[in-house]
Amino acid sequence: MKILTSTICKQGGREYNQDYLDLSVTENGACLVVCDGLGSYYGSEVASRICSQKIIECYTQIKAVDAERAVKPEFCQSYIQSAHNCVIDEKERNPNIKSSCTTVACVVSDFKSTVISHIGDTRVYFFKNKKLHFQTKDHSLSQISVEMGRIPLRDIRSDKDQNKLTRVLGSNYYIPPDCDIYNSPLAVGDAFILCTDGFWEYVYEEEMEEDLAFSNDPAIALARMEQRLLSRVTKFNDNYSAIVAMVVD
């Protein structure tokens, strides 16, 4: 059993790309990270890059010493805390990016257990047998409206408050990520999609299921999803990024 991955990170219709992703996948585990720098804050592409790279760096360092420890929830939390600290340090060195911040979504797994962590509205979808099993809840005003029963979950995509976030990484105060823990082993047919709002805004969950079921090759599934996105975007669409990870024989 192994994890196959495919990635995409594109500028879309914006002047530059503030998304960033990174990953480490071996025969005995994986760490997947997708970040989305906030477009209204100068230098947020720096925050997203630092965050992604630092999480992978922390994970690989711990895994080299103790692979079992690397997937413990407290260590997964510490990877993101370290990334936040690095972003803050860079902002102190470079006042020009003092407002920069980012979202983050992270999956760490050793096949026996899996930890899903996130801050902001970059999402993680977890599929079992190609059916949606779990998705993260956005840290946004629109998600609050969902929780209060004002709008259905699907309508977050078009809600006026969709991009108003209640939690980000790199701000002056640190709120830890939401952390979901799965202590049951992964199985063949399981899959993860980590993606920014520029991606999930145009690709619906039932379409993700359909495209995952179409092939055991994550590159083919991701290409089908991107075609759906491109058929729907406007001229000035957001950056869009995703990692598709499949558990295969």
Image (cartoon, helix red, strand yellow):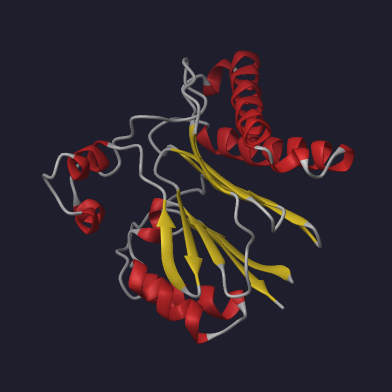
Tell which residue pokes out farthest to the front in this image.
184
Residue 115 in the image: above or below residue 165: below
> Which residue is farthest bottom?
214
Would you say residue 230 is visible in this rendering? no
Q: Is residue 185 left or right of residue 67?
A: left
Q: Residue furthest right?
A: 65
Can you say whether 170 is above or below 243 in the image? above
Q: Position of residue 135 (x, y in %)?
A: 41, 54
- The percent position of residue 30, horizontal first and vertical second, equals 71, 54
Q: Is residue 243 above or below residue 91?
A: below
Outermost residue on the left side: it is: 150
At x 43% / y 37%, what residue is drawn?
Answer: 38
Asked if residue 75 shows in the view, the reply is yes
Work out which quarter of the rendered image holds the N terminus and state it.
bottom right
- Taking the spot 33% from the left edge, 30% from the top edge, the residue there is 166
Q: Quadrant of the C terminus?
A: bottom right
Q: Nearer the viewer, residue 222 or 138?
A: 138
In the picture provided, is 185 more to the left or to the right than 233? right
Residue 23 screen position, x and y as percent: 69, 52
Left or right of 57, for residue 214 = left
Q: Observer-nearest residue: 82 or 233? A: 82
Q: Which quadrant of the view contains residue 245?
A: bottom right
Q: What residue is shown at x 63% (from left), y 74% (from top)? A: 188
220 in relation to 48, above or below: below
